[in-house]
Image (cartoon, helix red, strand yellow):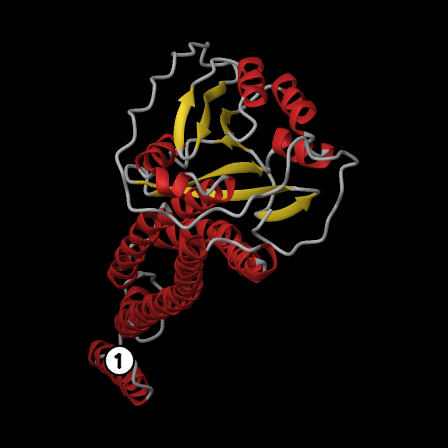
Amino acid sequence: MPLIAAKDSGNGRSPRRPVWRRATPPSPPRPGPAPAREPAVRRPPAEPVGIVQSALYQDGVRVSSPASLAETYRALRAQPSGMAWIGLARPTARELHSLAEEFGLHPLAVEDAMEAHQRPKLERYGDTLFVVLRAARYLDAPEEVDFAELHVFVGPDFVITVRHGAAPDLSAVRRRMEETPELLKLGPEAVLYAILDAVVDGYAPVVAGVQNDIDEIETEVFRGDPEVSRRIYELSREMVEFQRATRPLVGMLHGLMAGFSKYGTDEELQRYLRDVADHVTHISERVDGFRQALTEILTVNATLVTQQQNAEMRALAEAGFEQNEEIKKISSWAAILFAPTLVGTIYGMNFDHMPELHWAFGYPFAVLLMAVVCTSLYLIFKRRDWL
């Protein structure tokens, strides 16, 4: 396929139809017939969705809309120069095995598409490319980033998309391609470009939403919001996932561009793919910047929290010091008042046999003794700054 110079993994099957044909340059846009409406496929919500849309195209125009995989196979066999585009959402194992038998899909790729939870990658099995993409969308209400997984099989005359999650909106991609038949007639590689472009364009609202979250977090950090640390951590985890989704795309698209000359990719399609690669590089740089900004914000928040704790500890220490000074004063006055109380209490016992009871200077002596003791204690406490 004229897209990438990749190592042939091989699947032991010869191609059902000739490999890529060099597409003619796109002609000026012309209106095409309106696409046929798809019959609605109703299934219980808890069951796999299966086939979402299946269509056969000839020279960029939809010629039929089969309602089942079997009808799609028959229509494609009857139209050797046509292209089948099959869209699946959470398909069953039986549907994937049917596609594998008909189009010669490699078992490893089928297993990956069935189990999901794969990293973004691009692998070549014979004349079929297997692409794994991680789409993302920003949810305004919970202020979260929701990730979904998309698997794409691109062969000589077919495109199969297997979606695990709500994003991206592949029906919009199909409408866009059907409205530009001059691009769609370039073949499955043009469909792959449109899918890549939709996934990358879907990152832009996520970047805007995350930037707004970071601005809010900065305000909350300097406002001293106690919940901001948790929000920083959760957003950092989302940025790790976002980085895992975007960073591999840079290498994947550079690999596609490396195969332009070898496989004779159409020049117009080369421009489109280079444009997508530029957008991916820009998004990847923004995500790297977000991670760095969140790390710095977390550091600043930790510093502010430490400063706040130090200020609180200082305030507590000052309050304790003031309280200690007050206790010193109270204790000093209590000791000063205790001395005359002790003397007065002893001389107030009224025993018959006590010294100085009948002494003429007993009362003045007791009062003088109280004054001397109180004055001495006052001077001692004053010298020690207790008073």
Residue pictured at 76% horizontal, 33% vertical: 13
Q: Nearer the viewer, residue 340 or 323?
A: 323
Q: Position of residue 103 (x, y in %)?
A: 65, 28
Q: Which quadrant is home to the C terminus?
A: bottom left
Q: What residue did someone put label 1 on?
A: 374
Amino acid at the residue labelled 1: Cys
Residue pictured at 60% horizontal, 48% vertical: 121
Is residue 85 visible from the viewing direction of this image?
yes
Q: In this view, does 175 lie to the left or right of 187?
A: left
Above or below, 110 against 94 in this view is below
Residue pictured at 56% horizontal, 51% vertical: 3
Q: Which of 14 and 43 is in front in this view?
A: 14
Furthest residue toward bottom: 383
Q: Is residue 253 left or right of residue 377?
A: right
Q: Nearer the viewer, residue 299 or 368?
A: 299
Q: Position of residue 26 (x, y in %)?
A: 37, 48
